[in-house]
Image: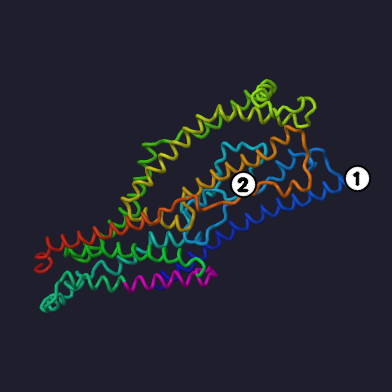
Amino acid sequence: MIVFMTLCFFAASNGKKKVSIRQDEIVASQSIVEEYLDNSKKIIDSLNAGLSPDISPWTNPQRLSVVGNRGARVAAMPASPLAFVSTGQSDLFTHAVKPTLTGDSYMLSFTEMSNPVQLLFGSFDLAFLCIYLLPLLVLGFSYNVLSSEKELGSLRLMLAQPVSLYNWLLNKLLLRFLIMTAIVWGSILAAMMVNGISFINEIGGVIQLLLLVAVYIMFWFVVALIVNAFGKSSGMNAVVIISVWVGLVLLLPAILSQTGNSIYPIPSRINMINEMRAAQAETTAKADTILQNFYRDHPELAQAEEGENSYSYYLKFFASQDVVKKEVKPVLDEYESKLKAQQNFVSTLRFLSPSLMVQNAFNNLAGTSSRHYESYRQQVVRYAEEWRGYFLPRMFRDEQMSVKDFGQLPVFKFSYDEVKSQYASDLLGLMLFTGCGLLFSVWVYKRHAREVLFS
C-alpha cells in the first residue's frame, strides 16, 4: 500500500506536469498573436497620422490578407480541471491551431508528430495506475482468503460455528474492500493536495472519480470471490486470477481494437493527400476561369472590376479553393466515415471489458477522449469558416483594415458542453458486471460447496 500511495503521488504529479506544459503552450501562442495584433494597430495609427513606418507591402496590416494570415487567432482547447487524471488522446493531438485566411480548413485534422517511444509505452497517470496496477493489488490481498484458511487447518474450526461459509467469505472480502477503498481514496485526494490541484471547485467531478474507482475495486473483489468460491488451492487461485486479469485488462481490449481495424479499415491517408494535391494543381491552372464563374454565381460580390481589385490573386485562390473543396469532399467523407465507424465499433463493444469502460469514463472526466478531440476539430472547422467569412466579402469590396476592425475579429472559444458524457453508461455497465459476478459467485459456491467443505 505504501508503494501504491507513492505511485499515486507520482502519477498525479506527472499528469499535472503534462497539463501545465499544455497550458503554457496555449498561453505562449496566444501571447504572440495578441502582441502582433497590438503592433498592427500601432502601425495603422502611424500610417493614418502620415508617418512612414519601415514595413514591407506584404506585411502592411492595412491589407486584409496580411491580418487574415499573420494575425490569425489561436483556436485552443484548454485543459479541463480533471485533465491530469488521464492523458487519453492528448498525446496524439494538438491543442492549439491557427486557422488562417488561406488555410485548408476543410481538411484540418490536428494530428501532430509524437514521440513513438512515448506512444508505445503510454503515460503513467492516475488512469493507468487504477486500471492496470490497482487490480493486482486487490487480487494480491484476496486471492487466498479461503484457501489459506484451508491450508492452515483453521477452516474446520470456523465451520464448527453456526455461520454460513459463503457469508463468512463475503464479509472478509467486504472488509478488505472497505479498507482498500478508503486507502485508495485517501491516496488520490492526498496526491491532489500535495500537487496543488484544487478539488473543492470541482467537487462533482472528484466524487464521480472516487465512485468510479470504488466500483472498479469492488468488481475485482467480486472476481476474487468467484475464484475463492471454487475452493481450489492458493497456487491455483493465483494462476487463475492472474489469467483473468490478463484476459480482461490486456487481451480483450487489444482484440476489440484489432477487430475494429479489420472490419473498418481506414483508407490510405497518403492517397487522400495526393488526390487533394492533384485537385489543387488542376484548379490553380484554371484560376481565371474559375473566378469568372464564381462572380457569375455570386454577383453581389462583383462590385469592382477584377483588374482594379488589389486582392485579385487571393480572389482567384478562394474561388479555386471552393472548387477543390467540392472535388475532395467525397474522399474526405469516405475517410471520416470509416474512422467514425471504427471508433463507434470499439465504443459499442467497450461494454465487454470493464477496463475499457473505466478507461472511457476516466477520459470523459478528464476531457481527453477521442470524442472530445473530434468535437474540437469540428468547432475549429466552423471557426475557420467564420474567420474566412469575416475577411472574404471585404476583400471582394477591396477594403482595408482599420484600428476598430481589430475589435470585431472573430474569437474562438472551445465548449466541452458539445460532447455528451458517457460516464453514466460506463459506470452502470461496470456495476452490471459487478452484480452479475456476485450472482455468479453464489452459483459457483452452491455448485462446489461440498468440494469446499470436505476437500
Q: Position of residue 135 (x, y in %)?
A: 34, 63
In the image: residue 325, left or right of residue 253:
right
Is residue 285 visible from the viewing direction of this image?
A: no
Q: Say whether disc 2 or disc 1 marks the residue closer to the N-terminus.
A: 1
Q: Position of residue 212 (x, y in %)?
A: 38, 62
Tell me the residue that label 1 is attached to: 50
Q: Residue at x 48, y 64 (%)?
A: 11
Residue 190 on the magenta span: yes
Q: Secondary structure at mark 1?
A: loop
Label 2 sits on what residue type?
A: Val
Residue 395 on the magenta span: no
Relative depth, front residue between 413 and 132: 413
Label 1 sits on what residue type?
A: Gly
Residue 59: quadrant of the picture: top right
Q: Secondary structure at mark 2?
A: strand
Tell me the residue that label 2 is attached to: 97
In the image: residue 172, left or right of residue 259:
left
If the image is split into quadrants, where does the N terminus sit?
bottom left
Give, as a single range, the part of the protein colored magenta: 178-199
Real-space Cα distance between discs 2 and 1? 36 Å
Relative to 250, say whether 3 is above or below. below
If the image is split into quadrants, where does the C terminus sit?
bottom left
Q: Residue at x 50, y 45 (%)?
A: 374
Q: Residue at x 19, y 65 (%)?
A: 233
Q: Residues within 10 Å of mark 2 (few under 14, many from 20)?
A: some
